[in-house]
Image (spheres, rainbow, N blue to C red):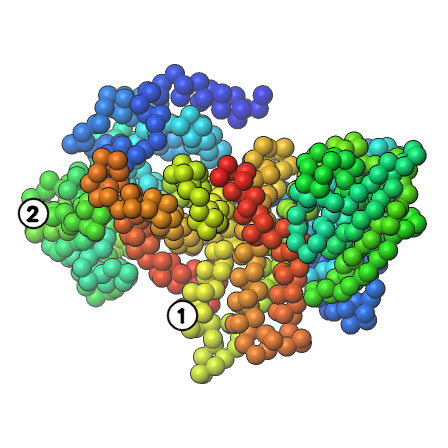
Amino acid sequence: MPLYHTEDQAMLAESVTGFMADEGGIKKQLRHWRDTNCKDGFGHGLWKQFAEMGLTGMLAAEADGGLAMGHVEAGIVLAEIGRNLTPSPFLTTSVMGVTALKDASDELRGRWLPGIIAGETVLAMAIDEGAKHKPEKIACRAERAGNGFRLTGAKDFVIHGTSADAIIVAARTSGSDSDADGVTLFAVPKDAAGIGHNAVRLVDSSIASHVRFDGVELDGSAVIGEVDGGRAVLNKVLSAGRIGAAAEQTGVGAGAFAMTTGYLKTRKQFGKLIGEFQALQHRAAHLYSELEIAEAVVIKAQQLLDGGSERAELMVSVAKAKAARACNLAVREGVQMHGGVGMTDEYDIGLYMKRERALTEFMGDANYHAERVAQLSGY
Amino acid sequence: MSELEAFRAEIRSWIEANCPEEMRKPVQDEGDICWGGRNFVFKNEGQKAWMEVCAAKGYTVPDWPVAYGGAGMSPAEAKVWREELARAGARPPLSSFGIWMLGPALLKFGTEEQKVLYLNQIARGEIRWCQGYSEPGSGSDLVSLQTFGEDKGDHWVVNGQKIWTSYADKADWIFCLVRTDKTNVYQGISFLLFDMTTPGVTTKPIKLISGASPFCETFFDNVVVPKHQIVGQLNRGWDVAKYLLGHEREMISGAGGGEQTSTIGKVLTRNGLDDPMLRAELAQFDIDALAFAACGEKFLDEIKVGRAHPAKPNMMKYAGTELNKRRHELLMAAGGSTALEWESEETRGGAPARSWLRTKANSIEGGTSEVMLNVVAKRILELPGA
């Protein structure tokens, strides 16, 4: 398969690009919700518009009312979300959440998917425990209790945790903390008794929650997939989240880069446009090269994931790491080349830097994925 | 089965049936590459047989038209061919500057007679070409070249000197940039072809830091070149040169899946090393190598359908060569003091060190990294005054 968009994908990209620039722009969304101190950190009206565009259910099966698209298509949306720094629950709900629900019972899919597709339901992912992503270790426990389970433990970095109608929780149902087996995924409704939130605003103005589960009673129907066999589902959810975050990062990087080269072409010092200085030209050209490489490996990994390739897992980690490094360079160079104004809240370049930082941490940073690449490659 | 999958099956069984065993081992050094040419000494029977059986089917240049010695494959088919070669671990049947550089330029700028004659010779591995571009005073500033062809009616008389001419001492013919008008810098250069056995042509190998001499000084002393041996129009050779440089940069970048795109982390376990810092560096490198491989694949896919920015080869050349230099720095580090050995049997005559030193030319030859960045800044990013 060639590594560029098909005609259908190009059409999707065109409509999403226009939509996100018009409706999801920085002033209209990110700055608005930030400056009004919104408790969700995103707008439900825009989420409704996502649904009207057919984006919310793009990964869901046609039988479930979705469009049965893949990660290449989801990546097109996420790149535009990145470019416009658009706050939305798309990644956690429509990408990771829907991926998890694909392995869920008819009952669970029927309960959550229609609302997601309609742009009314939001999902959050409760995976991390602690400040660094390390899903190999899961200590949060769900013990058998009657016909169901009792969930006890804590989860961190649960994006949209307080806004979510349900939280997908990776919990341990048997074995010890670092066992591969014995993990089960649950769809926990927000109104279940015993959930405690400590919501915090992050540097990028998104809202994350430290969630405590204090003996939350769940019946068996909340289980996604097999009891004790949730690792396979979790891995699919992680891959979806990682490649999604990588796609969003390429958009963040491209947005920051466009802003920066634009500045190089207008700002004058020493009687010249600063873009005339070779010291800056070479850095800009190097950055362009890094961003192009990141974009290529992201689409490669998306295609492999959609095609069910055995190389997909490796390449998703390669893509997440490469996108993180390239995008990080883009925002650092962006602020530096903007000079003093790059440090002001008035200019958007700093917002790109903040978002990059959060996306890098989400689902594993570049070092985490480098470690995975080494392990998966056998050294 | 789709047509392409049927084609893949056909290619796969053809390679299986025709590729000799000794051509299915990885290329170890320069001597394993089949360059072809009048005086080429084949390393073994298998190398010769593989080149000839491929040439007979047009597979040495699979996407060239059949009339010019190719197999007329579509871009998608040519990709299948490359993938199946890689899958079988089969070496390219023939490698040459004729295939990578002159061929594409002739396809675009050559006359029908030139295409039929020269392209078929290239495809069959009969004539080995070298490239006469750089001069002692014209490196990065190539357009200032001084080698001069004096108009003598039905021929030119060429005088001057080229340098860094790769394998000039082994080549049969040269494609050469010659000044034919001293009053116009850019529109005063012509692209000439001539036989290296023409009286007045001499070559002198240059010994490099690697100990090898792949490059030569090439001298022209009253060399007679018939007028029909020009490619493109008189004084418009710079257009041909620039077009060809794009292909050269693409080749050096390794975008087609050269050494640059393979991973090296396993050297750690192979060498029995327990070195977490090196392991981390190797993993970072492998990430960059795999990502660059994807970028190369994307770039080739885009070229085939005319979607690649015309200056993109410059970016690929920059990224690919810088990556390759880093690769060999890491391989030296992983090899430790063993990799320092210059002549031992264990290192096959100092192969790691010699390869490491050889890669330092990657970001110089065919346009320096700094020139590549200038071109990207100017033509792709459209930065002012660049």
Please state if B257 lies on the left or on the right of A217 as rendered: left
- Provide residue A116's location: percent of width, then percent of height: 83, 46
Q: Which residue is mark 1?
A: A278
Residue A126 horizontal/vertical position (percent): 77, 49
Of A246 and A295, the residue lying toward us:
A246
Q: Residue at x 76, y 59 (%)?
A: A208
Q: Position of residue A83 (x, y in %)?
A: 64, 59
Extreme-top residue of the structure: B17
Question: CA separation, marks 2 and 1?
Answer: 43 Å
| Quadrant housing the N terminus of chain B | top right
Q: Nearer the viewer, residue A262 or A127?
A: A127
In the picture as drawn, the residue positioned furthest to the front comes out as A176
Residue type beneath disc 2: Gly
Rendering coords of residue A310 (x, y %): 58, 32
The image's mark for residue B200 is 2
**Of helix, strand and loop, which one carries label 2?**
loop
Location of residue B35 with respect to B180 vertically, above or below:
above
Q: Judge from the rendering whether residue A41 lies leftward or rightward of residue B234; answer left or right.
A: right
Examine the image and state in which quarter residue A82 appears: bottom right
Q: Residue at x 49, y 33 (%)?
A: B76
Residue B243 is at least partly visible in this image: no
Left/right placement of residue A31 relative to residue B67 reads right
For the residue pair B188 and B363, the one nearer the viewer reads as B363
- Mark 2 and mark 1 in contact? Answer it, CB < 8 Å: no
